[in-house]
Amino acid sequence: MCVRLNKIVQKNYACYFIFFSIVLCYAAFLYMDFFTTNKTHVLKYVTIFLLILFYFLENGLEILCIDPIRRVTGISLCLAFVADYFLLLTYDYIWGIGLFCLVQICNLLQLRQIYECKICIMEHIVNFFIGIYIAMIHYRTYMFIILVICYFLLSVGNLFYAWRLYINKSKKIRFLAISISLLALCDLNVALWNVFGFVLCGNLIWLFYIPSQIFLEMHAKVW
């Protein structure tokens, strides 16, 4: 009993330490983005890694295996982590946006509550990758545009669906609705930064992105 209690205390201390590190990294790269010219790509990526570490440490593998919502949330966080690698460190926008399309599909699965059926998850993922493979073979030139359109449709659809469910049916998805909304604000600033070159919008991207991931984790915890 004492050994088990000891492990729980150690786990809580580790979670507190990781969460404090996340807040510290978040504040650090925001300050550097707004007030300096230093590159913050690595620091941002470390923050995402800490978020995933916090999520898996707090929930544990046993709970993730049993709880379908927490499992899908874990998959979504891991997909975002890999996508951020391509977008932040390699500038491979095709793979980055493609993986973020899968993140939006994970959100859609949660909203439609079809995560209980593993076949449905696999069908969505397999169909998506088949679509990308076909597009890469036949429409390589337009691949980026195709992915951006797919992501836009998924993002807008999830945003509308989340708030409609929250208002009409279930207050339990409030944190997921907030997460999707913050991610949409992040995407809006990405678009304004890339299309019009607004520097402020480039700095605002991560102001919204990290909280969106935190609210996603909160959704899985309180459901």
Image (cartoon, rainbow, N blue to C red):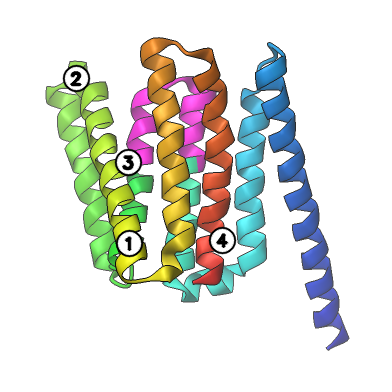
- From the viewer's perspective, is the residue at label 3 or at label 4 nearer? 4
Residue 86 on the magenta span? yes
- Report the residue that reaches farthest toward the bottom: 1
- From the viewer's perspective, is the residue at label 3 or at label 1 nearer? 1
In the image, what residue occupies the spot 52% across and 29% down?
A: 205
Residue 198: image x %, image y %? Answer: 47, 13
The amino acid type of the residue labelled 3 equals: Cys
Region of the chain picked out in magenta, as a range: 81-101
- From the viewer's perspective, is the residue at label 2 or at label 1 nearer? 1
Q: Secondary structure at mark 4?
A: helix
The amino acid type of the residue labelled 1 equals: Leu
**Which residue is labeled 2 in the image?**
142
Label 3 vs 4, first from the N-terminus: 3
Vertical position of residue 153 compared to residue 72: above or below: above
Mark 4 Cα shell of 10 Å, populated few (<14), some (14-19), many (≥20): some
Q: Nearer the viewer, residue 9 or 206?
A: 206
In the image, what residue occupies the spot 52% across and 69% down?
A: 64
- From the viewer's perspective, is the residue at label 4 or at label 2 nearer? 4
Q: Secondary structure at mark 3?
A: helix
Instruction: Say if mark 3 contacts mark 4, CB within 8 Å.
Output: no
**Which residue is labeled 4 in the image?**
218
Find residue 111 and name its label.
1
The amino acid type of the residue labelled 2 equals: Tyr
Q: Marks 1/4: CA distance?
A: 15 Å
